[in-house]
Image (cartoon, helix red, strand yellow):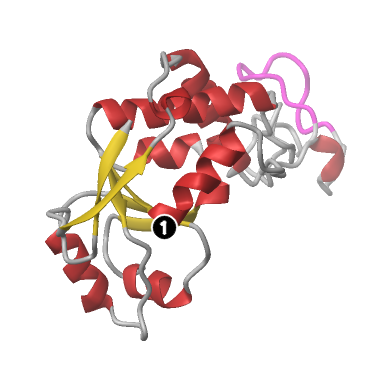
Amino acid sequence: MELEVYNIKGEKTAKKANLADDIFNIEPNDHVIYLDAKRSLAHKRQGTHSSKERSQLSGSRRKLQRQKGTGGARKGDIKSPILRGGARAFGPHPHKYNVKLSRKLKVLARKSALTYKMKEEKITVLEDFSFDKVKTKQYAEVLENLNMKDKKTLLVIHNQDKNVYLSMRNIPGTDSILASELNTYDILKAQHLLITESSIATIEGILNNKIAKTEQ
């Protein structure tokens, strides 16, 4: 599968990018996409929420009132969960929300997400570029040249470029990611993918298991 390669002026170049059909044109699996997106969101949860049970509170254990005859609910000590300032019954405690998913399923999910973007014509291949200095206006002009000023875009780059990142970070709806860290959730969240030429080989190498990659 071939796509036109554009420069940052929004002009077509003489080059064309070859995208592997076994990555960008497969039979998508919706359930695996859901599982991988769920895994990504779960990993972002801190899991530090906590509440105190009766044994963790300080206070008298004296029975507050007699058991029967008051017309109200039974009350034990001042740490009772039914009293204001008392303990929490079955409250949350710190724990991890990590969801395990095999590498094979993660790869299938990313391929499926990329296939959907390709079918929807939401992928644009850009020539590799860099900025000499940090200037938000520069990246805003790139988006305007590509007619993506008001779209949520994800720029997939091969190597981290500080000037490009700092130039884009103040523009709402724009984000960037290394090709080696591309994941299902970020693909789905973006309305349009801007993939640099050098990133294609990295994406295909990782998803076809030709490049060693430590899972995030």
Task: Please tell me which residue lies in front, 214 or 53.
Answer: 214
Which secondary structure type mostly characterizes the magenta part of the structure?
A: loop
| Element marked by disc 1 | strand
Q: Residue at x 46, y 55 (%)?
A: 198
Residue type highlighted by circle 1? Ser
Horizontal and vertical percent position of residue 60: 85, 44
Horizontal and vertical percent position of residue 98: 68, 33
Which of the 4 quarters of the picture holds residue 129? Answer: bottom left
Provide the residue designation for mark 1.
Answer: 176
* 154 with respect to 38 (left or right): left
Task: Please tell me which residue lies in front, 53 or 14.
Answer: 14
Q: Residue at x 51, y 25 (%)?
A: 109
As displayed, is residue 161 above or below residue 203?
Answer: below
Q: Is residue 182 visible?
A: no
Task: Please tell me which residue lies in front, 32 or 132.
Answer: 132
Is 73 one of the magenta-colored residues? yes
| Mark 1 surroundings within 10 Å by alpha-carbon count, few (fewer than 14), some (14 through 19), many (20 or more) | many
